[in-house]
Image (tube, rainbow, N blue to C red):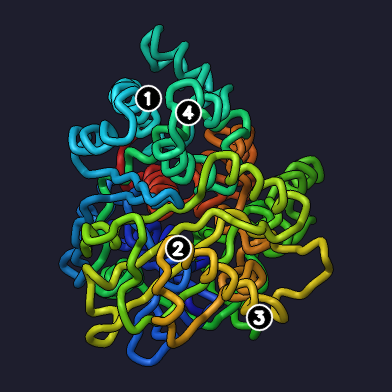
Amino acid sequence: MPRYDAIVIGAGHNGLICAGYLVKHGLRVLVIERSQIAGGCVRTEEIFPGFRVNTYSFEQYLIHATPIIQDLQLSKYGLEYYSVNPVMFSPFKDRKYMLFSRNVKETIKFLEKLSYHDAREYRKLVDEFEIINNILGIFSLTPPPSFKEIIKYAEEIEADELLQLLLMSAKEVLDERFETEYIKVPIAFLGPAAIGLPPSQKGTGWTVGWHMQARNLARPYGGAGRLIDALIKMITTHGGDLMLKQDVKEIITHNEAVHGVKLNDGRVFESRIVVSACDPRQTFLRLISEDNLDSAFIARIKKIRIANGIAMKADFALDGVPRYSCLGNGQTNAKVAAATYIAPSLDSLEKSYDEYKFGYNPKEPGLMVALHTPLDPSLAPPGKHILSLETRYTPYKLRSGEEWDEIKNEVGERLLEQFSEYAPNVKKLVRNMHVASPLDWERELNLPKGNFMHVDMTIDQLFSFRPIPEISRYRTPISNLYITGAGTHPGGGVSGIPGRNAAMVILRDLGVIGGD
């Protein structure tokens, strides 16, 4: 019977990063993945001949604010990034647009052309949120603090501002400061909309500063999946093992301690430590017998909220570059390759959320757009390009009773039609289309209701409440069973922080490294 120091269930980027830190410190580790492809949402596949598509997640900026890439020396294993500038682009139907640059002064200078008032207010907002982001950034790289600890850490005036932001909505914060939609829309996209919440949701005010992380935006040459390739090479070079197309049936426990895992095919692998990178509900309601858990604990796990999906995504192989009406002769590869966010207004995003909330496909969903090939031609044949459209918001279960497998291509075509209002030539360029519905996200990636956050990122399910207080510090009621992934602190997105944090807790518990 094979025996390991640690078994990680799930080869998404958090599971692999956790495994990477463990093998770096000498542990013998096995990573088990049910899919035939590692990476979870972070994968690059040749879904059209000659086209390498980021089939789910397509931007990486959060991970660059962490030490993970350096700690695991991923550049040694083939991971190479290129920077993007401008970092964000938002076109509007009136043929105006907003650009965010890596340099704040350049962003403000551009915004002055649209609204001098908003440019002045944006300068103030950046100064304010630099402080807030710094406080929250410090706490993201540790087991989650309580709200009391967060407020206590801040200076008195900053604590008051932070508390107010935690209680306000992003819409309130933006409407209070700005007069134009040109600045509000992209900020809302990389705030509440990114995590599946509407701008009007109370407790999202502090997310207004998240867009500032986009200044770190850099992409792996060859696609998002290069991060996963490098992690796998790092793990296997250090003696770790990876098994694909293997589903864990059960986490084996005895006397309230973990002993290993049993696969669906009946094989058993022993280990003194097990780390689940699956969503928390699946971990405790499917992989562990209820006999091993307190009934009150199980009841709290069952109350964890997971929204009715968040998004769908359509990818298109193109014979040329879409031309945005708003850019005219000023279109450049740098501009169209920036992280792009499209919605007419905050009210439009709100309307989309309201339709989604009641189980309807929004008539005009917000669009997160990726067009990376102008800066990374390795992804497509010469002269060809890849366009990706990801929605905010799309329901997993449809009120109409329609089945996603029957309608997803029709919906994908509607998304292209919507995008063509901003880039009229795009429909003539399309040669292939691939659509991933929320149901596809669930089936392929094992995501509950296709929800890549694992657990809703509402304020009452963040920090020391994520996913519930008893297990928010990555340890569980079962000895030597740990959790990681998007359902743990600090949440979803390609940051790798949940994986790193869980590994640090494990290594401290083993006495391999010092600290609390």
Residue 223 in the image, given as x and y percentages of width and height = 31, 71
Density class for disc 4 (Cα within 10 Å; few <14, some 14-19, many ≥20) is many
The answer to whether any part of residue 301 appears in the image is yes
Q: Which residue is mark 1?
A: 132
Of badges 4 and 2, the one in the foreground is 4
Q: CA distance from mark 4 to mark 3?
A: 50 Å
Of badges 1 and 2, the one in the foreground is 1
Q: Position of residue 478 (x, y in %)?
A: 63, 50
Tell me where residue 476 appears, x and y as whole percent.
Answer: 60, 46
Q: Nearer the viewer, mark 3 or mark 1?
A: 1
Q: Amino acid at mark 1?
A: Ile
Residue at 60% x, 57% y is 364
SS at circle 2: strand
Circle 1 sits in a helix, a strand or a loop, which is it? helix
Dot 4 and dot 2 residues touching (CB under 8 Å): no
Q: Secondary structure at mark 3?
A: loop
The residue most toward the left is 76
In this picture, is 245 found above or below 129? below
Which residue is the site of mark 4?
A: 174
Earlier sequence position, callout 1 versus callout 2? 2
